[in-house]
Image (cartoon, helix red, strand yellow):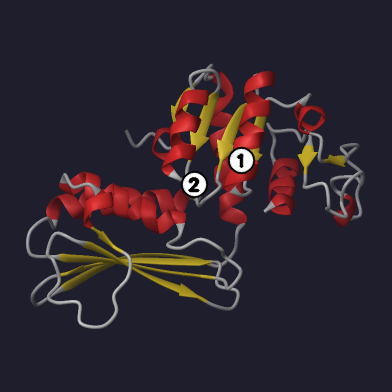
């Protein structure tokens, strides 16, 4: 994602690359951020958070939960706004992010794709109309290197649907089925996970009724749309002093 974000920023008319961060063990440390393109930006890749963020107004973070939380502390100290696309965050992480958002503006979303967030809005609308007599199943597929499951996007889909139905996802989600499971609880929201190959990200929500089935899907063939959505979120934060937002706020869906 780092390279795609750099290319998206350089292609933008109103965003400038101000810093580039990587882990200390990366071979890119101390090299120009656009060296992989055969270009020179004057921005060196660094593992020093304070140095990397010194000239920045917004950090776009696609890392791991432990990295994101460390980055947030540095951003809070420097007054740098943050766009978070990291998945696998625990409830404790989200609570800490909400606390930090009292001091800086943050957009938190498990998926920065504009298409995915339009899909989430469609799911909200569908759930409100298909609230009786339809079983809800969420199927997601990603590449074999993805370390968390279900995906953050699948979980967000479940949250949006559960909220629309007046349910608590923590109480109605079913993540595993094996053996004699008994009849399906009609109030449950099921999840199925596939991992393999280089699948960028496929998500399908099935509303299965008697005599008909409605499926709402989003399939990604590249990660470019994540970068584009992230820049839109960064631009949204430009005039926000603090607060916690998501892509529904960015896209004006509220």
The answer to whether 14 is drawn above or below residue 65 in the figure is: above
Crowdedness of circle 1 by 10 Å Cα count: few (<14), some, many (20+)?
A: many
In this rendered view, identify the residue nearer to me: 153 or 180. Answer: 180
Asked whether residue 119 appears in the rendered view, the answer is no
The residue pinned by badge 2 equals 89
Q: Position of residue 34 (x, y in %)?
A: 85, 48
The C terminus lies in quadrant: top left
Q: Is residue 113 visible?
A: yes
Q: Is residue 51 left or right of residue 5?
A: right
Q: Quadrant of the N terminus?
A: bottom right
Residue 145: which numbered mark, if any? none
**Closer to the camera in the image, 79 or 202:** 79
Whole-percent x and y of residue 91?
Answer: 42, 42
Q: Is the residue 98 above or below the residue 147 in the image?
A: above
User: Where residue 51 sits: x, y (%)?
Assistant: 82, 29
Label 1 vs label 2: CA separation?
9 Å
Looking at the image, tell me whether mark 1 or mark 2 is earlier in sequence order: 1
Seen at 21% across and 56% down, the residue is 172
Q: CB atoms at circles 1 and 2 under 8 Å apart?
A: yes
Which residue occupies 60% across, 59% down?
Answer: 223
Q: Residue at x 29, y 48 (%)?
A: 160
> Residue 193's quadrant in the figure?
bottom left
Q: How many marks?
A: 2
Above or below: residue 195 compared with residue 174: below
Q: Secondary structure at mark 1?
A: helix
Question: Alpha-carbon neighbours of circle 2 within 10 Å: few (<14), some, or many (≥20)?
Answer: some
Left or right relative to 179: residue 51: right
Q: Which mark is residue 68?
A: 1
Residue found at x 34% / y 37%: 253
| Quadrant in which residue 217 is drawn | bottom left
The local secondary structure at tag 2 comes to: loop
Q: Residue 211's spot in the image, x, y percent?
A: 9, 77
């Amino acid at each position: 994602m780092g390279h795609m974000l750099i290319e998206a920023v350089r292609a933008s008319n109103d965003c400038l690359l101000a810093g580039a961060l990587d882990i200390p063990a990366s071979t890119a440390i101390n090299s120009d951020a656009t060296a992989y393109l055969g270009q020179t930006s004057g921005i060196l890749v660094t593992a020093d958070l304070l140095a990397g963020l010194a000239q920045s107004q917004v950090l776009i973070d696609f890392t791991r939960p432990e990295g994101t939380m460390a980055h947030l502390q540095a951003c809070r100290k420097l007054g740098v706004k943050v766009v978070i696309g990291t998945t696998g965050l625990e409830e404790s992480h989200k609570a800490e992010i909400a606390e930090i958002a009292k001091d800086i503006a943050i957009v938190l979303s498990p998926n920065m794709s504009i298409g995915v967030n339009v899909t989430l809005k469609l799911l909200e609308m569908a759930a409100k109309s298909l609230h009786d007599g339809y079983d809800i199943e969420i199927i997601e597929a990603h590449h074999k290197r993805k370390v968390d499951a279900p995906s953050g996007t699948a979980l967000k889909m479940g949250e949006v649907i559960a909220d629309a139905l007046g349910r608590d996802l923590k109480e109605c989600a079913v993540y595993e089925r094996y053996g004699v499971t008994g009849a399906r609880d009609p109030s449950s929201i099921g999840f199925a996970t596939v991992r393999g190959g280089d699948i960028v990200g496929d998500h399908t929500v099935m509303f299965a009724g008697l005599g008909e089935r409605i499926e709402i899907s989003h399939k990604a063939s590249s990660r470019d749309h994540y970068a584009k959505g992230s820049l839109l979120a960064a631009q949204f934060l430009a005039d926000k002093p603090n607060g916690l937002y998501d892509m529904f706020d960015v896209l004006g869906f509220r």
